[in-house]
Image: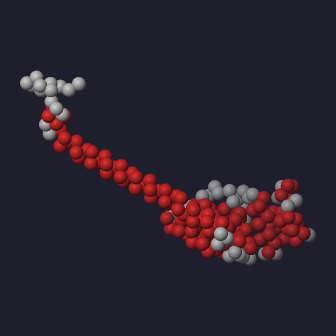
C-alpha cells in the first residue's frame, strides 16, 4: 500500500512519494544489465571454445583427414596447452602415421602434466622402442624404484633385449604375470629370449 503524503493525498508514483529515488535506481539497473550482458558473452565464448574445437576434431577424424585432425588438435592446444586429452590424441595420431619420436614427445608431455595418467608412461616407452631408442626406454623405465605395469615390463624387456642385455631382459620377462605372459608381445619376447 502506498504511503500518504504529508497533506493526506496519495502519491501517483514512487517518484512522487520519494523524490530523487529514481536517480539512485538508474545506476543500479545499468549495472545489472551490464552484468547480464557480460555473463551472456562469457557463456557464448565458453560454448564456442568447448564445442567448436571438439566438433572440428570429430569432423576431421570422421572424414579420415589426419592433417585436419592434427590442425584441430593443435588449435585446442593453442587455447589450452595443458589439455592432456588433445596431447594424447596427437600422440596416437603420430604413432598411427609412424612418427614415433613425435608420438613419444606428446606422451611425455601427458606424463608430465598428469603423472597418474594410466598409460602415458607406457605409450611414451612404446613409441621410443618403436623408434629404436632402447637407451631412452631403459632410462624411462629401468629405474629399480619404478613399479611397472605388465605392458611396461614387456617394453623394458624388449629394450634390454635390443641392447643385448639378455639377463636383465629375461628377468623382466619373467616378472610378467601369467595372464600377460600368454599375449602375443610376451610370446614374441619369450621366443626372442630362447
Snapshot quadrant of residue 97: bottom right
| Image vertical order of residue 148 relative to residue 166, above or below | above
Residue displayed at 74% across by 73% down: 130
Snapshot quadrant of residue 119: bottom right
Residue 81 percent coordinates (x, y): 52, 65
| Image vertical order of residue 102 relative to residue 113, above or below | below
Quadrant of the drawing holding the C terminus: bottom right
Snapshot quadrant of residue 164: bottom right
Residue nearest the viewer, comparing 4 with 104: 4
Left or right for 21, reference 35: left
Outermost residue on the right side: it is 194
Quadrant of the drawing holding the N terminus: top left
Residue 14 percent coordinates (x, y): 19, 34
Q: Is residue 14 at all visible to an observer of this figure?
A: yes
Residue nearest the viewer, comparing 97 with 101: 97
Left or right for 21, reference 117: left
Q: Please give the count of numbered marks on the rendered protein.
A: 0
Outermost residue on the left side: it is 7
| Image vertical order of residue 13 relative to residue 168, above or below | above
Residue 63 percent coordinates (x, y): 65, 69
Residue nearest the viewer, comparing 67 with 7: 7
Residue displayed at 85% across by 64% down: 184
Q: Is residue 91 at all visible to an observer of this figure?
A: no
Residue nearest the viewer, comparing 14 with 36: 14
Left or right for 136, reference 47: right
Amino acid at each position: 500500500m502506498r504511503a500518504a503524503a504529508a497533506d493526506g493525498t496519495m502519491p501517483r508514483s514512487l517518484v512522487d512519494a520519494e523524490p530523487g529515488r529514481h536517480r539512485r535506481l538508474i545506476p543500479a539497473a545499468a549495472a545489472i544489465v551490464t552484468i547480464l550482458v557480460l555473463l551472456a558473452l562469457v557463456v557464448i565464448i565458453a560454448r564456442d571454445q568447448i564445442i567448436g574445437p571438439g566438433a572440428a576434431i570429430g569432423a576431421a577424424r570422421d572424414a579420415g583427414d589426419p592433417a585436419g585432425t592434427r590442425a584441430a588438435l593443435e588449435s585446442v592446444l593453442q587455447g589450452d596447452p595443458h589439455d592432456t586429452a588433445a596431447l594424447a590424441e596427437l600422440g596416437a595420431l603420430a604413432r598411427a602415421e609412424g612418427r614415433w619420436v613425435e608420438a613419444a614427445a606428446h606422451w611425455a608431455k601427458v606424463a608430465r602434466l598428469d603423472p597418474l595418467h594410466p598409460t602415458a608412461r607406457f605409450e611414451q616407452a612404446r613409441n621410443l622402442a618403436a623408434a629404436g631408442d632402447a637407451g631412452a626406454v631403459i632410462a624411462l623405465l629401468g629405474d629399480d624404484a619404478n613399479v611397472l605395469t605388465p605392458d611396461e615390463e614387456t617394453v623394458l624387456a624388449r629394450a634390454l633385449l635390443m641392447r643385448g642385455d639378455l639377463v636383465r631382459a629375461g628377468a623382466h620377462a619373467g616378472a610378467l604375470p601369467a595372464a600377460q605372459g600368454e599375449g602375443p608381445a610376451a610370446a614374441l619376447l619369450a621366443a626372442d629370449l630362447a
